[in-house]
């Protein structure tokens, strides 16, 4: 019995003395369709295969096992939805096996896109992440005639009531503008995939940006757990982002998880576990957020099944191509970026 006690004690001491693994970059993805490698890809697979995330760390406290390569790049698959993303990111941030104090975080996933701003297959770096769930709401059939929407900001009585106040409940997150601009400038000329199916769909819109071949841009995100769709809701998303950023943000992409991710990272930063200034969010356009001319919103939504989006595979490719340029630069010049954030024009 005494020998067993000593063995357990020594094991605990050894574990406590093991130095955490320093992480340079965390790649945050949200879903995978099957296995991590070798089948039809989700957001995680290209990173696992191409960046050789071959070392697996069991991660029962999160959604999916972690993967890491020899260059200090760690892959996280959070699961779909705000709750899973928040829980998985928090679990990683508190994991004693990793030193994340200098790590850069890159969210890389697909999204719907506003055709006013971008085309299928495009990639948008967000500076603002706005929550589309934290609100009051009344049924659309009961909206007063002079209201534009049934969504009302928390602690307000009518839509877009002024003055706008930030309640600190996570309605909006503002990423480091200089870091976002650095990532954009570094990747703005990355060549993105195009195909005939995407060209055919985008030419049905009259908006100039919708008709462009895929491109890299800066554009903000509305994150909501409800998968919404349609022209009127796209109008709401534009207004909602504008309201919650005091006119500084421009809605471009719609996704689900990123306010959960940002909330956990904000709390972890307060605990000294991460640097929330080192966070980047990249969303790529797998589908338009609204119906094409001649269709109803319901008809358009019915065709938007996961993996059936017109821009699904090109959007996955764009997330990797654009995001990898940033990862490669950070890893290659880690001595420069470990202690100082990148800035455009600074050697």
Image (spheres, helix red, strand yellow):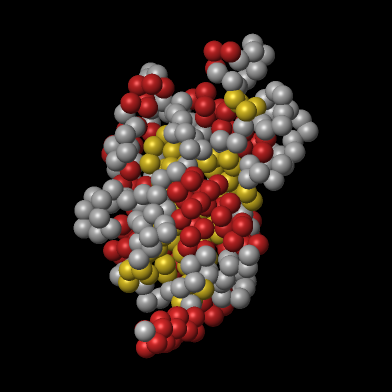
Q: Residue furthest right?
A: 163
Question: What percent of the width, then of the height, locates residue 281?
Answer: 51, 53
The quadrant the N terminus occupies is bottom left
Q: Residue at x 63, y 42 (%)?
A: 171
Q: Eyeballing the image, is 149 above or below 222?
A: above
**Nearest the eye: 345 or 43:** 43
Q: Is residue 346 left or right of residue 256?
A: right
Q: Residue at x 57, y 58 (%)?
A: 265
Q: Residue at x 37, y 77 (%)?
A: 70
Q: Is residue 327 left or right of residue 58?
A: right
Judge whether residue 101 can be spotted in this image: yes
Q: Residue furthest front?
A: 1
Q: Eyeballing the image, is 43 above or below 312?
A: below
Q: Residue at x 31, y 29 (%)?
A: 303
Q: Is residue 46 left or right of residue 139?
A: left
Q: Eyeballing the image, is 133 above or below 41?
A: above
How many tags in the picture? 0
Q: Residue furthest left?
A: 38
The quadrant the C terminus occupies is bottom right
Q: Eyeballing the image, is 208 above or below 260?
A: above
**Nearest the eye: 260 or 288:** 260
Judge whether residue 187 can be spotted in this image: no
Question: What percent of the width, then of the height, locates residue 145?
Answer: 64, 11
Question: What percent of the width, then of the height, locates residue 60?
Answer: 38, 60
Question: What percent of the width, then of the height, locates residue 11?
Answer: 41, 83
**Nearest the eye: 63 or 120:** 63
Q: Quadrant of residue 304?
A: top left
């Amino acid at each position: 019995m005494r020998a067993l006690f000593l063995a357990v004690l020594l094991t605990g001491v050894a574990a406590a003395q093991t130095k955490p693994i320093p992480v340079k970059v965390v790649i945050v993805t949200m879903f995978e369709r099957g296995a991590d490698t070798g089948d039809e890809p989700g957001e995680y697979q290209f990173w696992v295969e191409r960046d050789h995330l071959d070392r697996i760390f069991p991660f029962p406290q999160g959604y999916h096992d972690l993967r890491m390569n020899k260059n200090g790049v760690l892959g996280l698959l959070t699961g779909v939805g705000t709750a899973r993303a928040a829980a998985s990111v928090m679990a990683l941030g508190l994991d004693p096996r990793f030193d994340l104090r200098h790590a850069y975080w890159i969210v890389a996933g697909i999204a719907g896109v506003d055709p006013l701003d971008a085309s299928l297959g495009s990639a948008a770096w967000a500076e603002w992440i706005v929550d589309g769930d934290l609100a009051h709401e009344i049924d659309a059939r009961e909206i007063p005639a002079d209201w534009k929407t049934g969504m009302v900001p928390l602690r307000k009585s009518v839509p877009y009531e002024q003055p706008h106040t930030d309640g600190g409940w996570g309605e909006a997150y503002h990423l480091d503008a200089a870091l976002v601009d650095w990532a954009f400038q570094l990747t703005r000329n990355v060549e993105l995939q195009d195909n005939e199916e995407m060209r055919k769909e985008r030419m049905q819109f009259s908006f100039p940006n919708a008709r462009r071949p895929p491109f890299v841009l800066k554009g903000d995100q509305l994150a909501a757990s409800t998968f919404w769709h349609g022209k009127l809701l796209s109008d709401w998303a534009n207004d909602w982002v504008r309201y919650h950023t005091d006119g500084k943000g421009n809605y471009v992409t719609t996704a689900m998880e990123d306010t959960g991710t940002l909330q956990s990272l904000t709390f972890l930063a307060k605990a000294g576990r991460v640097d929330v200034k080192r966070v980047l969010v990249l969303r790529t356009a797998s589908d338009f957020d609204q119906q094409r001319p001649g269709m109803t919103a319901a008809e358009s939504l019915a065709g938007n099944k996961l993996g059936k989006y017109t821009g699904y595979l090109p959007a996955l490719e764009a997330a990797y191509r654009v995001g990898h340029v940033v990862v490669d630069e950070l890893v290659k010049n880690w001595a420069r970026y470990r202690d100082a954030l990148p800035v455009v024009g600074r050697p």
